[in-house]
Image (spheres, rainbow, N blue to C red):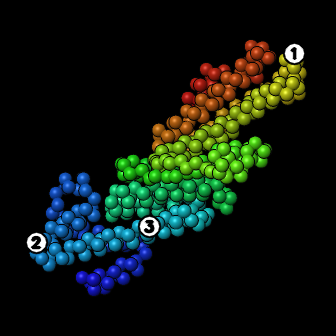
Amino acid sequence: MSIFRDLIRPRYISLNDIFVIAELIEVCEEVTALIPDAIFSNLRIVDHILWQISDELKRVGREGNMLYPFVQNLIADVQERLIFRAETFIQDEVEHYQLSRDDFTFFIQESQIQGTISHGDHEWFPPLKNTLSCLATLYRCLDSYTFSSLAAEVVQVCMESIVRASRSDRIGLRDTDACLFTIKNLLILREQISPFESDLMEHPVAMRDLDLAQIHGEVHRIFSGEANIFASSSGQNYFPVPRVIKSNLDSRKRLDQCVKVACEAYIMFVTREIVDPMLAFLTKVTALRASDSLSLDTPISTLAFATPERLAEIVLQVNGALAHKLPQFIRQMTLYIDSTVSREMILNAIKSNVVEAHSQFSDFVMTQYGDNTPSKIDLKLPSELAKFLDVS
């Protein structure tokens, strides 16, 4: 038996392609054709394979029983090879994937034309596509516990790869394109890993992190002379030691947080693109009052940046952005984000921020310049603005 193993092992140990190794494991799947479909809903493919092979070998008799441990070890050995090559694949094709402008040409071109982006997987970001291919392959060939550990790692690496790519100076994506590129790919990742969620939740990966917060305070005490590094109340040398914090790596939770951060960044960017003149004006007034450079008795309208004419210019800029920039942002978001629910969530948050900025600016103007001033400078009231945004 050992001679047979030594003869066949070099054949699969030399394999490097994880998809070829997976096919080798699945070669035995043909013998499971007679297994009822109900069994497949509860057992892994490898379990079916071993069970069926065991049953078939037992029918052979004593010789079959002798061969069964070899077959079992063979499949386990090939699985180990698959795990090893999968980790290498994750590093090379996801974590350390070499970016090029060709990977982003599709996004750059589509963001500059009024077309419709095809959301087929052939246009997916390569590390994302590699991640999903890897997960689908491992899911078919590994037990749940082993798969969940590798899946948590590759999902985390893929998230980091997407965010890192969007920030790459070599690619030169515009700010809006970078934000939407991140959101688009993270949403695809979240959608595509949904079949694996039960495994990820059932077998969370244990993590250990160092808490350095306590050390900062203790080191400060040592340098300020409040604590002695060479002595303590117990008579032993004193030196601060970081705490070890144990936690579980929840890939789906971290992915949701990453999506949230990306969406918030885009929402704030678009909000500033539209109402930044108003926000800058209110911030300047608040800063002057906080620094006592502007007394409460001094009329705001006497300042050069706050004359009625200047207010009219601010409102004109914002109205122009509402009429032209906001529709462009909406069209661009439609090109990138396929999910209507996600688009509506982002758009509603943007509209809410725009309404809030107008409300604060309007309240300030009416308090400092009179109730009739908003209409004189063509400032939209909150009710008018809401109707305008609904049309947009």
Task: Name the residue tied to disc 3.
Answer: 86
Residue nearest the viewer, comparing 27 with 69 = 69
Q: Which residue is rendered at x = 59% and y = 64% of the image?
A: 99
Horizontally, residue 18 falls left or right of residue 377, namely left
- To which quarter of the image does residue 368 belong? top right
Task: Name the residue tied to disc 1.
Answer: 297
Query: Which of the labelled discs sits on residue 59, or is there none?
Result: 2
Given the current orientation, which residue lies at the most extreme front position? 235
Q: Amino acid at mark 1?
A: Asp
Q: Which residue is rendered at x = 70% and y = 23% of the image?
A: 360
Q: Which residue is rendered at x = 87% and y = 15% of the image?
A: 297
When the figure is inspected, residue 275 is found, relative to residue 67, above or below; the finding is above
When the figure is inspected, residue 1 is found, relative to residue 254, above or below; the finding is below
Residue nearest the viewer, comparing 322 with 340 = 340
Q: Amino acid at mark 3?
A: Ala
Q: Which residue is rendered at x = 32% and y = 69% of the image?
A: 76
Residue nearest the viewer, comparing 360 with 25 = 25
Q: Residues within 10 Å of mark 1 (few under 14, many from 20)?
A: few
Looking at marks 1 and 3 on the same chain, the residue that comes earlier in the sequence is marked by 3
Q: Amino acid at mark 2?
A: Arg
Horizontally, residue 170 falls left or right of residue 67, namely right
Whether residues under marks 1 and 3 lie with C-beta atoms below 8 angstroms apart, the answer is no
The residues bearing labels 3 and 2 have C-alpha atoms spaced at a distance of 36 Å
Looking at marks 2 and 1 on the same chain, the residue that comes earlier in the sequence is marked by 2
Q: Residues within 10 Å of mark 3 (few under 14, many from 20)?
A: many
Numbered disc in front, either 1 or 3: 3
Q: Is residue 139 among what the camera can see?
A: yes
Horizontally, residue 138 falls left or right of residue 318, namely left
- Report helix, strand or loop for mark 3: helix
Q: Is residue 372 among what the camera can see?
A: no
- To which quarter of the image does residue 75 belong? bottom left
